[in-house]
Image: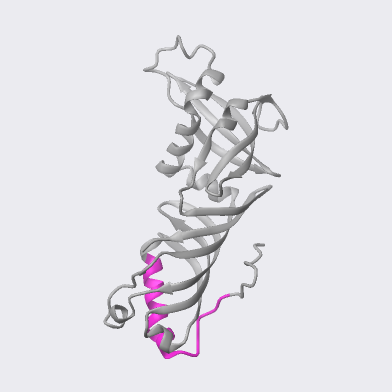
Amino acid sequence: MVEPLQGYKNPSESSGSRLIQSVLTPAIRFWLGTQVDHADDLAIEIQSRDRQILKGYIPSIQLAADRICYQGLSLGRLVVSATDIRVNWWGIARGQPLQLLAPIPVEALMCLSEADLNRSLQVEMFAQALTDLMAHDLLSIFNPNVETTDSSTLSNPSIDRIELRTDAIVMAIALTDGDRTTHHYVLSKLVLKDGHRLGFHQPQLLDHTNAVEGRSLPQLEEFSIDLGETVELTSLDITPGQLLCQGTIWVQP
């Protein structure tokens, strides 16, 4: 079960303010609907006074949702808390969509299951990012004859499946050479670099999917996955079947 952010209260529909109930909460729900493809059990709590809202200022918004889908990526359970939010209040009051008037820091706690990650592998940008990351160096490791192989028949590796173990992931990688497909397994820990990059630590090539250790792949430690300058992760925990991360995301207007 996901623990909430420190100081976070389980959100419920905001009450006590007519402006929040009748105008602001529906506007936020509509705005969220334009940002994500799907979200279940969305709950919102808004901390603001009417006179602050009339100035377009919201001190705090907290929300939680399950089974979020963002641009085809399955994100699982998400709990967020945003502060010092400035919006186009008078536009909202006239029926216009909510707009952010300044970047806001959003504290986020996200839980992804193994199933979430594997569903996301079907998304082109996710699969391509992993393939591009590893293709160049792993081709020669997986296929010692890569330099003499007809490049027109040799495809880049694709990630077929990800398994989450204690403090580590196992990636099942398929490599196709003409009509022949071989499968390889890479075990690695994940580490945070500069808050916005994920790096491999102690990566190994396994002989089979159930192996607990294999041949070292030190060259993979040179690579990292850049999550973008607007992301600053503070923690990343991997347990069997689950990945839990926490940090700050700067949401731009």
In the rendered picture of this protein, how many numbered marks are placed on residues? 0
Picture residue at 32% right of the left edge, 76% below the top: 88
**From the viewer's perspective, is residue 23 above or below residue 122?**
below
Picture residue at 66% right of the left edge, 27% below the top: 208
Picture residue at 34% right of the left edge, 73% below the top: 98
Residue 71 screen position, x and y as percent: 40, 53
Quadrant of res 209: top right
Left or right: where 34 falls relative to 234 = left
Residue 169 screen position, x and y as percent: 63, 40
Q: Point out the image quarter for the C terminus.
A: bottom left
- The part of the chain drawn in magenta is 11-33
Residue 199 screen position, x and y as percent: 58, 39
**Residue 135 magenta-drawn?**
no
Quadrant of res 127: top left
Quadrant of res 191: top right
Q: Point out the image quarter for the N terminus.
A: bottom right
**From the viewer's perspective, is residue 207 above or below residue 24?**
above
Viewer-side residue, 51 vs 201: 51
Picture residue at 54% right of the left edge, 47% below the top: 117
Q: Main secondary structure of the magenta part?
A: helix
Viewer-side residue, 208 vs 111: 111
**Residue 23 magenta-drawn?**
yes
Residue 229 screen position, x and y as percent: 46, 50
Left or right: where 116 falls relative to 123 = right
Give the colouring mode of the picture.
one colour
Which residue reaches farthest right?
A: 212
